Amino acid sequence: KEVVVSGIRSTGYLHLGNYFGAIHNYIKMQEDYNCYFFVADYHSLTTHPDPKDLKANVFRVVAENIASGLDPEKVALYAQSDIPEIPELYLMLNMLAYKGELERVPTFKDKVRLNPDNVNAGLLTYPVLMAADILIHRGAKVPVGKDQEQHLEMARNFAQRFNSHYGELFPEPQVFRFDENTVKIMSLDGNGKMSKSENVNATIYLSDEDELIRKKIMKATTDSGPQEPNSAMPDYIQNIFQLMQLVSAPDTHATFLDAYNNCSIRYGDMKKQLAEDMVNFVGPIRERAAALQQDEDSIRKILKNGAEKARARAAETIAMARKAIGINYY
Ligand code: TYM
């Protein structure tokens, strides 16, 4: 079975972007692949979260993944910090990662611009840690959203560099997804992608209550409608159609699309329909996740069990990497 690896940072509440860009693909892959899915708690430390919040953040990500349909019996579901082989490989890869290339990564440049007071080395080497997460399992496929593609390209570069220095060990991990429609879920105000921390009112979280979901969708950006039949859609309208395609019945989507194309669409009605379908979609996930979070013991068991599975493979990889490098003294 091919090895699949992916992670989600424990930096806040998960939203529709995380669901459709990542979790939805995890669930589809869990039957047919050898899957390693983890909570990237080390990655969350770049912004120095309050130690008191860390555990709840990690447990919530686990609960929300399981509530969405991930089966911890079928995959290894674990916390990054439970796998000491990851930081070891990270150290090795850091010797092959160059300052210049790391400084050129667009997400790094964004962080520097937005937060010039906290340009720490962990932020700079973020893509190296991410490569270590993947390569520690010799991962071949990585289900992620569009925003992570650049990081994946760097992981391939580091893999290749290691291989050419020390001999073939790592496959070059490829981005994987079932459906191009889900690679980038936009914010409801039409400004950029949905994200954990920005535009809270234009982001639908898996933990949002029904009324809040309705309110957010009714406020989604629209306009007075198309002026000519079959006109091109502005991004924010396309976004509403995209969400409808993901959570509503196919004929509901088709009906509104026809209405758009013949200029009879009423966005108020469309949003009302989308809001109800969204409530029916998110509601059960929210309820299951809330119930699971009450049961810390089972989350702990799931993480322990996941870490055991992940460490078994990680230990194999790190032994091979040490040997390849020449750390082979006794
Ligand atoms: P993170 O925690 O920001 O996001 C988790 C996953 O959700 C996807 N995603 C989206 N997809 C579509 N539309 C959106 N609006 C949207 N927002 C987020 C992300 O692409 C991601 O797949 N660096 C990673 C975590 C990570 C990782 C890894 C991923 C650490 N190590 C190794 C894969 C492999 C991150 O911050 O994702």
Image (tube, grey):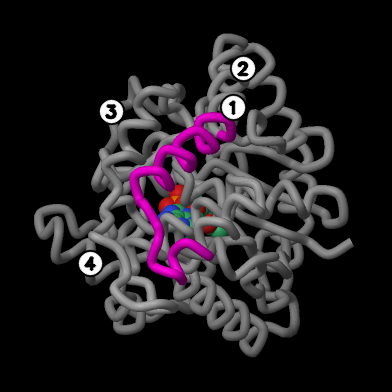
Question: Disc 2 vs disc 3: Cβ atoms closer than 8 Å?
Answer: no
Q: Position of residue 217 (x, y in %)?
A: 36, 40
SS type, badge 4: helix
Q: Quarter of the image containing the C terminus?
A: bottom right
Q: Give the number of the disc on residue 40.
A: none
Instruction: Please report whichever mark, 3 or 1, sits nearer to the chain's N-terminal start.
Output: 3
SS type, badge 1: helix
Instruction: Please report whichever mark, 2 or 1, sits nearer to the chain's N-terminal start.
Output: 1
Instruction: Please report whichever mark, 2 or 4, sits nearer to the chain's N-terminal start.
Output: 4
Q: Give the number of the disc on residue 110.
A: 4
Mark 3 crowd level (few <14, some 14–19, many ≥20, 10 Å Cα): few
Cα distance in 3D space between marks 2 and 1? 6 Å
**Residue under numbered circle 1:** 63
The kind of residue on which mark 1 rests is: Ala
Q: Position of residue 89 (x, y in %)?
A: 58, 61
Check residue 283 for magenta coloring: no
Measured along the vertical axis of the image, is residue 306 above or below residue 234?
Answer: above
